[in-house]
């Protein structure tokens, strides 16, 4: 079943793992309790088998014990968040979730359930899995959808950024420091470049500082990098550069093997009159992407919050 399962339902699942999980003495003995909701050894074995089947690489279910417990804990929290606003795992909720799950994996629902059952996954284990994610989507929708709607100016900014990535180049100076691989030393390097940034913000000579401190090949030229196309840089960095006035500097940014401060010397846009001309469909795609990103960010934070406040006992 290689590549059969792309676990889209796990977009909000926390990736942290819990310490060792002792096997239950009896199949229905509790292995964890989440706000009085019991997870049994049977639940754990079934979720591990489900994850093993999803993995599609032939690894045994036992290899997924810790991940299985983690996802079960998170699912209990999601279900409880739904119950708090009147949502429950009805037959309709389960069917909606399973139909979407099958669609995401390119199978008819009947075929997918038959294959899962054939690998020893019970219908109850399947239904519990899809119900938790279906309820969580509704919790997130109710709590964050209106709040996450991007403003018209935010959409315009993103559209300008896409134009800049294609047509805009930036003339830059840099001061770069290399990391050593030693955690303590690298923390000191990060602190040092932040201090240098603060000094330069106060009016220091960037090129002189580059000659004195930079460890990149451009140091002898006063940090001069020349012209760099927007599509050769990370999107977030281009966004930061667009907010700078000529002569201003970025906060320290990560580079390969180290950290750097960049100074914007000049910017130019090629082959464009600076106006953004996009169709309604293109604008809507940008709106949907920004909305999805913000909803996911808020939902992840909310999940971390309810987990922090939960009473979780591992047995």
Image (spheres, grey):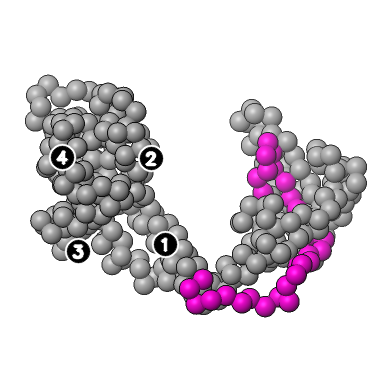
Kindly report which numbered mark, 2 or 4, lies closer to the viewer in this rendering: 4
Q: Residue at x 67, y 78 (%)?
A: 275
Quarter the C terminus occupies? top left
Q: Which is more foreground, mark 4 or mark 3? A: 4
Q: Quadrant of residue 96?
A: bottom left
Q: CA distance from mark 1 to mark 3?
A: 22 Å
**Side of 80 relative to 57 (left or right):** left
Q: Position of residue 244 (x, y in %)?
A: 72, 65
Query: Residue at left 38%, top 40%?
Result: 15
Mark 3, residue position: 85
Q: Is residue 182 above or below residue 194?
A: above
Q: Position of residue 106 (x, y in %)?
A: 30, 48
The alpha-carbon separation of the residues under discs 4 and 3 comes to 33 Å
Q: Which residue is mark 1?
A: 292
Q: Earlier in the sequence, mark 4 or mark 3?
A: 3
Q: Which residue is mark 4?
A: 114
Q: Quadrant of the N terminus?
A: top left
Can residue 44 be seen here? The reply is: no
> Which residues are the magenta region?
253-282
Q: Residue at x 27, y 45 (%)?
A: 74
């Amino acid at each position: 079943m290689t590549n059969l399962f792309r676990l889209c339902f796990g977009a909000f699942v926390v990736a942290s793992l819990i310490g060792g999980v002792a096997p239950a003495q009896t199949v229905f003995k509790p292995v964890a309790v989440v706000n009085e909701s019991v997870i049994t050894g049977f639940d754990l074995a079934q979720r591990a088998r489900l994850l093993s089947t999803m993995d599609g690489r032939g690894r045994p279910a036992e290899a997924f014990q810790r991940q299985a417990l983690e996802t079960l804990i998170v699912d209990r929290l999601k279900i409880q968040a739904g119950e708090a606003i009147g949502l429950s795992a009805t037959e309709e909720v389960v069917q909606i979730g399973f139909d979407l799950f099958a669609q995401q994996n390119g199978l008819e629902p009947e075929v997918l359930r038959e294959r899962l059952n054939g690998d020893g996954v019970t219908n109850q284990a399947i239904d519990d899995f899809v119900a938790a994610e279906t309820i969580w989507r509704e919790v997130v929708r109710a709590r964050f959808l209106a709040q996450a709607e991007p403003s018209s100016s935010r959409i315009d900014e993103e559209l300008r950024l896409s134009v800049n990535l294609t047509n805009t180049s930036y003339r830059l100076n840099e001061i770069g420091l290399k990391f050593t691989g030693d955690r303590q030393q690298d923390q000191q390097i990060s602190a040092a470049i932040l201090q240098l940034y603060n000094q330069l913000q106060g009016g220091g000579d960037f090129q002189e500082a580059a000659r004195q401190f930079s460890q990149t090949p451009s140091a002898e030229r006063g940090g001069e990098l020349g012209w760099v196309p927007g599509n050769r840089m990370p999107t977030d960095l281009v966004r930061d550069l667009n907010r700078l006035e000529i002569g201003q500097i970025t906060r320290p940014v990560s580079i390969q093997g180290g950290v750097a401060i960049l100074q914007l010397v000049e910017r130019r846009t090629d082959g464009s009159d600076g106006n953004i001309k996009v169709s309604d469909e293109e604008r809507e795609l940008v709106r949907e992407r920004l909305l999805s990103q913000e909803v996911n960010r808020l939902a992840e934070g909310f999940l971390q919050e309810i987990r922090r406040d939960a009473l979780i006992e591992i047995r």
